[in-house]
Amino acid sequence: MMWWIIATVCAFFIKGLCGFANTLIFNTILSFENNNINISPIELILGYPSNFIIAWKKRKQIQWKICLPLSALVLAGSIPGMFLLKNADTHAIKIFFGFVIVAVGAEMLFREMGKRTFGNSKVVLVLIGILSGVLCGLYGIGALLGAFVNRVTDDSDAFKGNICFVFIIENTFRLVLYAYLGILTVSSFTKALTLAPFMLLGLFAGMWSSRLLNEKMIRKAVIVMLMVSGAALILNNL
């Protein structure tokens, strides 16, 4: 249980600080000893209220022309992702998850360094939205979505408000479908309730720290940590 508490505090501290990446951190810490089908429902329950809290605080910065189309695309990709989570081989999923972390981390790191990666065309928007939906269905990962929203918003507050609104829509849909598919269980809710105080502790500590720390440096450190963790996850499952 200690690792679940550590994962929760660390993940939601980063959520409060940066507005995303909580799922990647939560899953990375716990995936070494747990299957994703057991991790994702708990993280979803914990993440749902955190998105409401941040979106409400940043509600004036929400841009509907950004978040509504992205929400639709993410929902379209979530369905195949959730069926993969329920039926695919967990060993293969962990390897794929590792590659996803490394790839997302590399793209985000290049972006932080001011280097051009992929563009902001409508085709790119569609591809990112659908792939983000598949990843959300599999693991609840919205990092690709974050990489795009970071391009089309002007500041950190706008980024947090828009991405958390998209997460609210996606989370609501995934909660219903997880319950229908039998992925969401009473045991998941029980463990999530036990971890909820640690989620709130991490979230508010991160939100408070975001006013004091250099957010750009923190994001770079998180990205590097995620890439190393993803590489280790791949090697451990080859």
Image (tube, grey):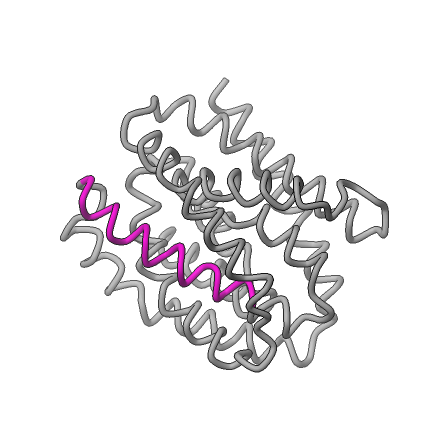
Q: Seen in the image, is 176 located left or right of residue 156?
A: left
Q: Tell me the residue at 36%/69% (across/down).
A: 49
Q: In which quarter of the image is residue 149?
A: bottom right
Q: Quadrant of residue 231?
A: top right
Q: Seen in the image, is 10 located left or right of residue 17?
A: left
- Residue 207 versus residue 167 in the image, above or below: below
Q: Position of residue 163 (x, y in %)?
A: 54, 62
Question: Principal SS element in the magenta part?
Answer: helix
The one nearer the camera, 207 or 147, is 147
The one nearer the camera, 237 or 95, is 95
Q: Quadrant of residue 146?
A: bottom right
The answer to if 187 sits in the magenta stretch is no
Q: Where is residue 65 in the image (x, y as percent from the top left)?
A: 59, 64
Give the total of numbered labels.
0
Q: Where is residue 155 in the image (x, y as percent from the top left)?
A: 71, 71
Q: Where is residue 87 in the image (x, y as percent from the top left)?
A: 28, 26
Q: Seen in the image, is 221 located left or right of residue 199?
A: right
Q: Seen in the image, is 73 located left or right of residue 109?
A: left
Q: Tell me the residue at 78%/53% (across/down).
A: 112
Of all residues, the one furthest to the left in this rendering is: 186
Q: Tell me the residue at 54%/32% (across/down).
A: 98
The answer to if 180 sits in the magenta stretch is yes
Q: Tell me the residue at 49%/60% (across/down).
A: 10
- Which residues are drawn in magenta? 162-181
